[in-house]
């Protein structure tokens, strides 16, 4: 590109954009060239009878008169000189982008900066209605696609459809998108698809502060040694698998963080899970309950495994069951209590 510009007496700063065919949208060399030249990379579709020679591509992309300066099928480079400044947004479309983000536990200051940047740059925002509202404030020109919490695969497919049209799409999850959240559904939808336009979408996943980490931080450091995260929901896996994993984790003396611990449709499962844990843990084992941590009205409570009852917990509660080494102590003049699991082990 630089050689072609020099050959025609053009300064690199005069370059408005690089234009390529959609089939090349995932080509890293093109993205690198655009970054080095500091210009937008746009994609335009020629008519079928035109094929994709570089000159034909420019003819299809530009909507203003121009002078053809250079057209080399060997290098794939064509240059067009326009008498007026060109707005790159009027040329073809950008490469579609899908960013899967985690909002964290709910407080704006606990959202990672990369997630906020993705939201600010998005043209379309998808997610469970409650989480999309938590993502605000949003601009009036941003399109919001809120859905029911049970429509994960449909939501993921819709996100790829929008992104494959050249839009900048953000998929919203609470906590971390890779922990019992939307990153899995997005990757599952992509793997099952044979659509080349979906494969060309620029996909990235931005981590977030999970509910377990937010609760643990407020309590102290109960996850300070080996731990595991378990969902007690049997909507997507049989209860027999949950029981088996609970038994192994309890026997291994791992600290356990329970997601989806109880609901109106599953009122008995937490008690069953606690019965399994109590076969391996003493009644004095420390337990942390964090409800809506990071959101208005959030509460934190510490108690023992012997004291814990399922009535203490609802679907919005994170349950952290300590190991045999987990400790609690009071410290400071404000009467605070801290729970932690030492990194050493006896």
Image (spheres, rainbow, N blue to C red):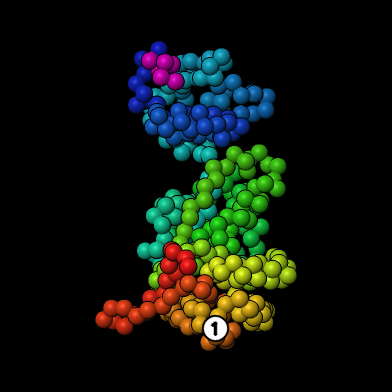
Q: Quadrant of residue 199 in the image?
A: top right
Query: Of 247 and 64, which appears nearest the observer?
Result: 247
Identify the residue at the far top of this view: 7
Q: Can residue 223 be seen in this view?
A: no
- Asked if 58 appears above or below 69 in the picture, the reply is below
- Asked if 85 appears above or below 280 in the picture, the reply is above
Identify the residue at the far left of this view: 333
Residue drawn at 57 percent across, 42 percent down: 201
Classify the position of the N terminus by image quarter: top left
Residue 336 position within the rendered picture, expressed as x and y whole percent measured from the top left: 34, 80
Query: Of 201 and 192, which appears nearest the observer?
Result: 192
Residue drawn at 67 percent across, 28 percent down: 48
Residue drawn at 59 percent across, 33 percent down: 22
Query: Of 335 and 323, which appears nearest the observer?
Result: 323
Residue 54 position within the rendered picture, expressed as x and y whole percent measured from the top left: 55, 21
Q: What residue is disc 1 on?
A: 283
Determine the secondary structure under disc 1: loop
Assess whether residue 3 is covered by the magenta stretch. Answer: yes
Q: Main secondary structure of the magenta part?
A: helix
Q: Can residue 338 be seen in this view?
A: yes
Report the span colored magenta.
Answer: 1-6
- Asked if 272 appears above or below 212 in the picture, the reply is below
Residue 44 position within the rendered picture, expressed as x and y whole percent measured from the top left: 56, 32
Residue 36 position within the rendered picture, expressed as x and y whole percent measured from the top left: 40, 29
């Amino acid at each position: 590109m630089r050689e072609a510009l020099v050959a025609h007496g053009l300064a690199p700063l005069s370059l408005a954009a690089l234009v390529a065919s959609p089939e090349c949208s995932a080509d890293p060399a093109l993205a690198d060239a655009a970054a080095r030249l500091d210009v937008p990379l746009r994609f335009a579709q020629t008519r079928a009878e035109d094929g994709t020679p570089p000159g034909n591509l420019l003819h299809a992309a530009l909507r203003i008169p121009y002078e053809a300066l250079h057209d080399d099928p060997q290098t794939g480079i064509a240059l067009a000189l326009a008498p007026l400044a060109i707005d790159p947004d009027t040329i073809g479309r950008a490469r579609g982008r899908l960013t899967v983000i985690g909002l964290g536990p709910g407080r704006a200051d606990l959202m990672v900066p990369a997630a906020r940047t993705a939201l600010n740059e998005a043209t379309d925002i998808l997610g469970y209605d409650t989480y999309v509202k938590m993502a605000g404030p949003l601009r009036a020109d941003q399109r919001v696609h809120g859905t029911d919490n049970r429509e994960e695969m449909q939501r993921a497919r819709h996100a790829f459809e929008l992104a494959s049209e050249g839009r900048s799409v953000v998929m919203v999850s609470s906590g971390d998108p890779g922990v019992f959240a939307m990153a899995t559904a997005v990757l599952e939808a992509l793997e099952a698809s044979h659509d080349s336009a979906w494969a060309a979408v620029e996909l990235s996943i931005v981590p977030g502060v999970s509910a377990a980490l937010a609760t643990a931080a407020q309590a102290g450091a109960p996850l300070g040694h080996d731990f595991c995260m378990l969902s007690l929901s049997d909507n997507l896996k049989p209860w027999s698998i949950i029981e088996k994993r609970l038994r192994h984790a309890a026997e291994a003396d791992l600290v356990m963080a329970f997601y989806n611990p109880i609901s109106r449709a599953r009122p008995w499962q937490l008690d069953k899970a606690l019965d399994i844990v109590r076969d391996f843990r003493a009644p004095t084992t420390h337990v942390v309950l964090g409800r809506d941590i990071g959101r208005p009205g959030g509460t934190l409570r510490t108690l023992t495994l012997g004291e814990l009852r399922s009535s203490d917990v609802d679907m919005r509660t994170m349950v952290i069951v300590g190991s045999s080494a987990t400790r609690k102590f009071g410290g400071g003049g404000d009467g605070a209590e801290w729970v932690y699991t030492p990194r050493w082990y006896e």
